[in-house]
Amino acid sequence: MEKKTINNNNQERKHITPLHIGRGWGVGLLLLLLTACSNIDEDERLIYVEPAEVNRPVLIEDFTGQACVNCPNATATIHELQQTYGEDNIIAVAIHSGPFAHMRNNMGNAFYSDLGTTTGDEYFTHWGIEAQPGVKINRGAPIYDTNQYATAVADELKKTSTVTFDLVSFEGDAVLVNLSSSDRVEGKLQVWIVEDSINAKDPQTKYQQFMPDGSRRQDYVHNHVFRASLTYDAYGEPVTLEAGNKAYTKLFQVQGNTDRDNFEHLWQKQNLSAVVFFWNEQQGVMQAIRVPFGTSKPAAVED
């Protein structure tokens, strides 16, 4: 069984109003962190959505940050969806990005070791993320209200796909991908590395998390954190899948000196997974799969 730890505050979760962000990322934003939540009536906090039939996995790109006080609530909502549908069907990636991933003090020094990446910041800007927490579900429009997650996920789970991952293997520093489609389709293949169980209590790190009550959680555990993309283009490798389930196969390796050094010395290999997905602008994410380090999988869901 995959070991996961989700650390959230023990208070009752509330509906949240995300904090909207200007394009200038400033230290003054810190003063807003403690006032970013809004309270609403008890009977409006939870919206029940009947679980959907699962026809294909759903990818949730969660734009988050350690200094984002409302982000732990979004993480908890995503975790509830994973409990309902299974982690193979709800594939979450926490993309630490934007101003709340790179907070610094007046001296210009980082408060802590942040989890942000240059690629994550590129995604944050490219997709026009205006508030945190903000998510993209199967590459749809950004959603900023956690009460809307369940409905959007249910709608995507019901859709079928012609695309199948016949084999994905994550061995060593490489991910082997084999996919096919029953119909001809053009799109992009993305291969990411994510890491679980990043703990602020680790003496080598300071990955603390700001919480909704304004405190800093020293023992917070960060899961499914985006670490790197293995494609040269940050938005994926262009791929045309021909009709008749003709296989496309390619090996992707960890690139660049920094990522390779992190792979060897910083990231904990036993906590790594490859997240692989096929998408295009018209249909969004058509198929996705998550494969832990040292393992291989067929498609999580087949058409």
Image: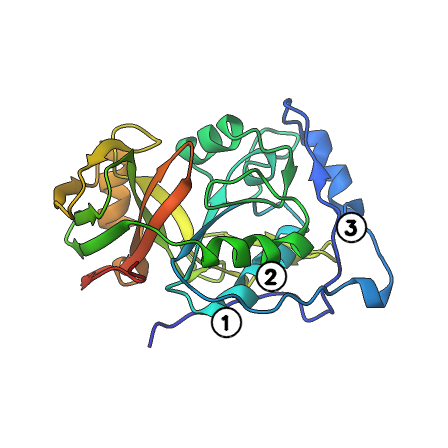
Q: Can residue 114 be seen in this snapshot?
A: no
- 167 or 224, which lies in front? 167
Point 37% across, 64% down: residue = 88
Q: Earlier in the sequence, mark 2 or mark 1?
A: 2
Q: Earlier in the sequence, mark 2 or mark 3?
A: 3
Q: Do residues under tags 2 and 1 come within 8 Å of each other at their CB atoms?
A: no
Q: Mark 3: which amino acid?
A: Cys
152 relative to 204 in the view: left or right: right
66 relative to 236 in the view: left or right: right
Locate residue 248, reporting x and y percent: 14, 42
CA separation, marks 2 and 3? Answer: 16 Å
Location of residue 208 (image quadrant): bottom right
Q: Mark 2: which amino acid?
A: Thr
Q: Which residue is mark 3?
A: 37
Point 68% across, 26% down: residue = 22
Tag nearer the camera, 2 or 3:
2
Residue 300: which numbered mark, if any? Answer: none
Locate residue 47, reporting x and y percent: 71, 64
Q: Earlier in the sequence, mark 1 or mark 3?
A: 3
CA separation, marks 2 and 1? Answer: 10 Å
Locate residue 165, reporting x and y percent: 23, 53
Q: Helix or strand or loop: what does disc 3 sit on?
A: loop
Q: Residues within 10 Å of mark 2 (few under 14, many from 20)?
A: some
Q: Which residue is mark 1?
A: 83
Location of residue 18 (image quadrant): top right
- 234 or 141, which lies in front? 141
CA separation, marks 1 and 3? Answer: 25 Å
Q: Mark 1: which amino acid?
A: Gln
Point 60% across, 61% down: residue = 77
User: Looking at the picture, does residue 244 appear above or below residue 120?
Assistant: below
- 237 or 116, which lies in front? 237
